[in-house]
Image (cartoon, rainbow, N blue to C red):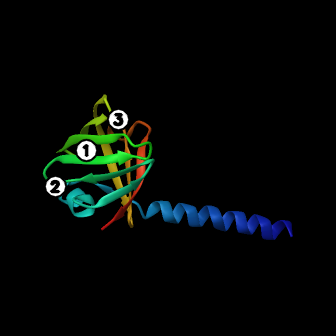
Amino acid sequence: MKSITTLAAATAILLGAAMAADAKDIKKQKQFLDAVAGKTLTGNGATLVISADGKLSGKLDDGRNVAGAWVWNKRFWCRNLVVGSDTLPQDCQTVSLDGNQVTFTRNKGKGDSGGTYTISN
């Protein structure tokens, strides 16, 4: 019985690693636009729309509005946000795509997660 449990745990770890390996880093603005522009991103306590014209908008689950602007700079998505009445500093983030899941990582990929969102529409 112990060997079956060990085998099941090892299989789960390998499958998890394989699934994580499917995520692809987005390095070009065209890839980013193809993946998310004009689509609804839901997750991380928010619903957002990132527009091809460099704007973003949405709403947090607590009712606060989100508005901002973004640019693509080299291989980073750089955004300025206003959440409710709070202005957040600019942050350039890496972006990865795994199926219909997009993940942002703050501080040029060296910081905390900026959230994982499900893409729809």
- Tell me which residue sits at (36%, 41%) in the image: 109
From the image, tell me which residue sits under label 2.
Answer: 52
Local secondary structure at mark 1: strand
From the viewer's perspective, tell me whether residue 88 is left or right of residue 2.
left
Label for residue 84?
Answer: none
Q: CA distance from mark 3 to mark 2?
A: 22 Å
Confirm or deny contact between disc 3 and disc 2 (CB under 8 A). no
- Tell me which residue sits at (27%, 54%) in the image: 49
Rendered view: 111 above or below 43: above
Amino acid beneath label 3: Asn
- Quarter of the figure that contains the C terminus: bottom left
From the image, tell me which residue sits under label 1.
Answer: 76
Local secondary structure at mark 3: helix
Mark 2 or mark 1, earlier in chain: 2
- Image coordinates of residue 107 in percent, x first then y, are 35, 35
Which residue is situated farthest in the front direction here?
63
Mark 1 or mark 3, earlier in chain: 1
Sort mark 1 into few (<14), some (14-19) or many (20+) by Cα contacts within 10 Å. many
From the image, tell me which residue sits under label 3.
Answer: 107
- Quarter of the figure that contains the N terminus: bottom right
Confirm or deny contact between disc 1 and disc 3 (CB under 8 A). no
Sort mark 3 into few (<14), some (14-19) or many (20+) by Cα contacts within 10 Å. some
Amino acid beneath label 1: Phe
Amino acid beneath label 2: Ala
Q: CA distance from mark 2 to mark 1?
A: 15 Å
Which is closer to the viewer, label 2 or label 1? Answer: 2
In the image shown, does 53 or 63 lie closer to the viewer? 63
- Image coordinates of residue 102 in percent, x first then y, are 37, 56
Which residue is situated farthest in the right direction here?
1
Rendered view: 121 above or below 114: below
- Image coordinates of residue 82 in percent, x first then y, are 28, 34
Q: CA distance from mark 1 to mark 3?
A: 10 Å
